[in-house]
Image: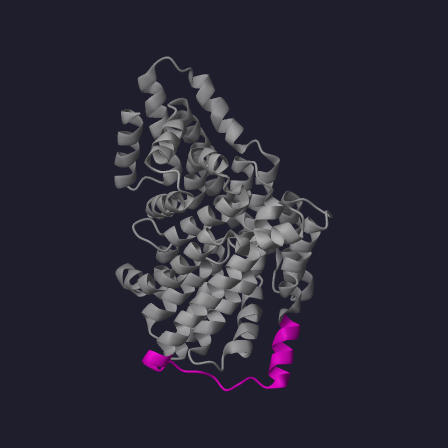
Amino acid sequence: MIILTITLIILLILRVPIGFCLMLSSFAYILWAGDISFDIMTQRLEAGAENFTLLAVPFFIMAGKLMNAGGITDRIFNFARAIVGHIPGGLGHANVLASIFFSGMSGAAVADAGGLGSIEIEAMRKDGYEAGFSGAITAASSTIGPIIPPSIPMIVYGVFAETSVAALFAAGVIPGLLMGLALMIMVYIYSIRFNYPKHARAKVKQLYDTFVAAIPPLITPLILVGGILGGVFTPTEAGAVAALYALFLGVVVYRTLNLKRIGEVFLDSSFTTASVMLIVIAASLFGWVITLERIPVIAGSFILSLTQNTIIILLITNLFLFFVGCFLEPVAAMIILIPVFLPICQQLGINTVHFGIIMVLNLMIGLLTPPVGLVLYIIADIADTPFEQVVRATLPFLIPLIAVLFLLTYWPYIVLILPRILNLV
């Protein structure tokens, strides 16, 4: 175990990509152990990818990239601006609302930050907003993407925790909306304090025109979630439906995609999928190693030896996940930590759907924290702003997100009300 930990820490310090960190540290452990066949290593790597539900991941990645390439994000942002642009800090509110809309299509925070981010930051810059504030609210609002369904992290959690993905999708709706509301309150406070601009209230015709232009992408969540909950297709098949619908919008409805651009999107999606799946299979191997070392059992026993008070254990869990999120990519962190925390949840009677939302939201907040916060790097690049400035500006926006996290942690009714209404839990 010492070899595994030391190798992992050294590779992380050297900024080796997380997938290779997990794989190489596992390889070092197997090499040091001496009595484990390398055939097992290849079998565990292969087993990490052999899950039908994981097929949804490349499809949702492709759907998000097709939406961005097809100019669909522009229409979403224009509609959001028409709705809330008249409130003080109007474009900040539009930024959050657009992320709520887009979250029902992409399922990934990175897709939101990279797609909507460039449009939102440019519009806010022209309107006189500070670069730091523009980048901060864009980064913070992108974390809503994996909470409101569909969600790539929730698919991964559902697979490895053997929990209903449909129930997780339903459970994410209200938390995602609460995150948006909390961020908009923060934007309003900032806007009053720093006198950020607002637009004239949109006329009925402008609202109508932007709404009509945005209708096709806006009904994407209804198609996907309705299809899953109605039993028309599985969450995996929903990914394929999302990709095909995004392609239909770009080619037929808006005519913004040509063969060359589609080819570029497919290639880009392939690279992204390869990166994600490398992390999945590497984390699967790493998880097998720590299970072999009985780390989940030891960790669970240690936590339960401290206290069996559910309130305190949930607090410890949140603090631990927040810490891990600062250093590990969310998918890798989930695959490694699910075997650790799931037995504790089962012993204390914590609903696995409820815990899934807690885990995903915690790790999404981790995308906003250095040193590994991927969204921060994307926003810094898009905004052409020093990374340190983006980090400083984003820190206050952690407050509303953490507040929502603790509300969801200690009031599971908010998370479970929709799954229970739909008889999914």
Q: Quadrant of the C terminus?
A: top right
* Residue 354 position within the rendered picture, expressed as x and y whole percent measured from the top left: 51, 47
Depth check: give the residue in front, 354 or 224. 354
* Residue 66 position within the rendered picture, expressed as x and y whole percent measured from the top left: 57, 56
Identify the colour scheme used: one colour
Asked if the magenta segment contains residue 334, the reply would be: no
Direction from residue 358 to residue 366 in the image, left or right: left
Direction from residue 413 to residue 282 in the image, left or right: left
* Residue 104 position within the rendered picture, expressed as x and y whole percent measured from the top left: 58, 58
- Residue numbers of the magenta segment: 192-213
Depth check: give the residue in front, 74 or 223. 223
* Residue 7 position within the rendered picture, expressed as x and y whole percent measured from the top left: 28, 30
Query: Residue 113, can we see it?
Result: no
Can you say whether 196 is above or below 49 in the image? Answer: below
Asked if the magenta segment contains residue 210, the reply would be: yes
Can you say whether 80 is above or below 152 in the image? Answer: below
**Residue lying at 51% horizontally and 54% vertically, measured from the top left:** 147
Q: Quadrant of residue 253?
A: bottom right
Query: Total label count?
Result: 0
Direction from residue 43 to residue 419 in the image, left or right: right
**Residue lying at 28% horizontally and 25% vertically, measured from the top left:** 3
Q: Quadrant of residue 216?
A: bottom right
Q: Quadrant of the N terminus?
A: top left
**Residue lying at 62% horizontally and 47% vertically, measured from the top left:** 166
Query: Residue 213, can we see it?
Result: yes
Can you say whether 273 is above or below 218 in the image? Answer: above
**Residue lying at 33% horizontally and 63% vertically, measured from the top left:** 394
